[in-house]
Amino acid sequence: MSTEALSTAAGLVNAPLIHKGKVRELYDLGEHLLIVVTDRISAFDYVLDPPVPDKGRVLNELSAHWFALAAQIQPNHIVHTDVAKLGGLVSDPDKLKGRIMVSRKAQRIDIECVVRGYITGGGWRQYQATGEVNGIKLPEGLRKNGKLERPIFTPAGKNDVGHDEDIPFDEMARRVGRELAENLRDRSLKLYEFGRDFCAERGIILADCKFEFGLVGGEVILIDELFTPDSSRFWAEEKYALDVEIDSMDKEPVRSYLAGSDWDKNSPPPRLPDEVVKATTERYRDIYRRLTQA
């Protein structure tokens, strides 16, 4: 994989840019969308400098890998990932190789469909405060990072700016309708179980994850990304432990660096040191290798 980072596809794609997220850029191809996954990295709602080489390529190729594997149980938005098929729409195909996904246009359902198999992170903080997670009452005496008796569905309302909002299932049903809410819950739990079992065969624990869905002609399809380090919490089995902060297989070096700095999280963040960027690139490459056996 390359050591050169891509911070934006601006100037490389001859199509209208219709959305620029923290990591992804969406271009309008008419019938379809072109999604370009950059190497930008964010933390605490800030995009950081410099970008992390290969992060975008790992996210895109890992999503494509999972979309193909899970297509048997859940239709998705992917059309193809071959930059050569874009022809003159791309001025420098080599820079975008492995980073693009042409997808069907879908009406996004504004709910993050989160599934938790372990009690950790934000779920653990909710449980400590209330004994519940998104309104779901859990048994007393659970320990941080403990495996739940069965996975739970804990949706969040999507916000394009700032954090998504944890909501009870009944609130999700009020927003999108109960029939669709139950449909998305069942699809999400099935997908989590599929991903969990696949990861377990490769020595990885899928602690929790989130999905996004959209509608195409009334059909529910999976959109955005699937089982990547940006949308899922992966733990190496050999590092699993209770009652501690487990070193997850994602941008943990960035979070650790920022947590140990004097940054106040309200002003522009400090530039990431070279060693932090290098360590983060290796994290993304490692999870890619372990999940794809590449």
Image: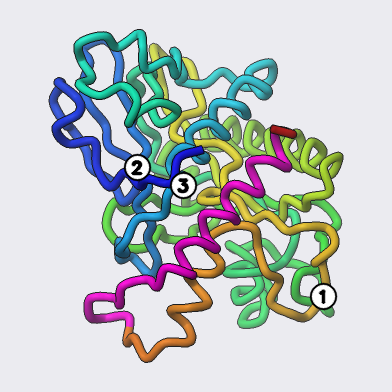
Measured Cα–Cα span from mark 3 to mark 1: 29 Å
> x%, y% of residue 247?
67, 69
Identify the element where label 2 is drawn: loop
Please tell me how crowded label 3 is: few (under 14), some (14-19), or many (20+) other residues with Cα within 10 Å.
many
Measured Cα–Cα span from mark 1 to mark 2: 35 Å
- Chief SS of the magenta region: helix
In the displayed structure, 100 sits above or below 201; it is above
Q: Which residue lies under the disc numbered 3?
A: 55
Residue at the extreme bottom of the image, as rendered? 262
User: At x 83% / y 58%, what residue is drawn?
Assistant: 237
Q: Which residue lies under the disc numbered 2?
A: 38
Whether the magenta-drawn stretch holds residue 269 is answered as yes
Whether the magenta-drawn stretch holds residue 15 is answered as no
Q: Which mark is in front, 1 or 2?
A: 2
Range of residues picked out in magenta? 265-292
Is residue 114 in view from this perspective? no
CB-based contact (under 8 Å), mark 2 and mark 3:
no
CB-based contact (under 8 Å), mark 1 and mark 2:
no
Q: Which labelled disc corresponds to residue 132?
A: none
Q: Earlier in the sequence, mark 2 or mark 3?
A: 2
Q: Which mark is in front, 3 or 1?
A: 3
> x%, y% of residue 92?
25, 24
Q: Earlier in the sequence, mark 1 or mark 2?
A: 2
Left-right relation of 32 to 195: left
Identify the element where label 3 is drawn: helix
Q: Which residue lies under the disc numbered 1?
A: 242
Task: Locate the C terminus by quadrant.
Answer: top right
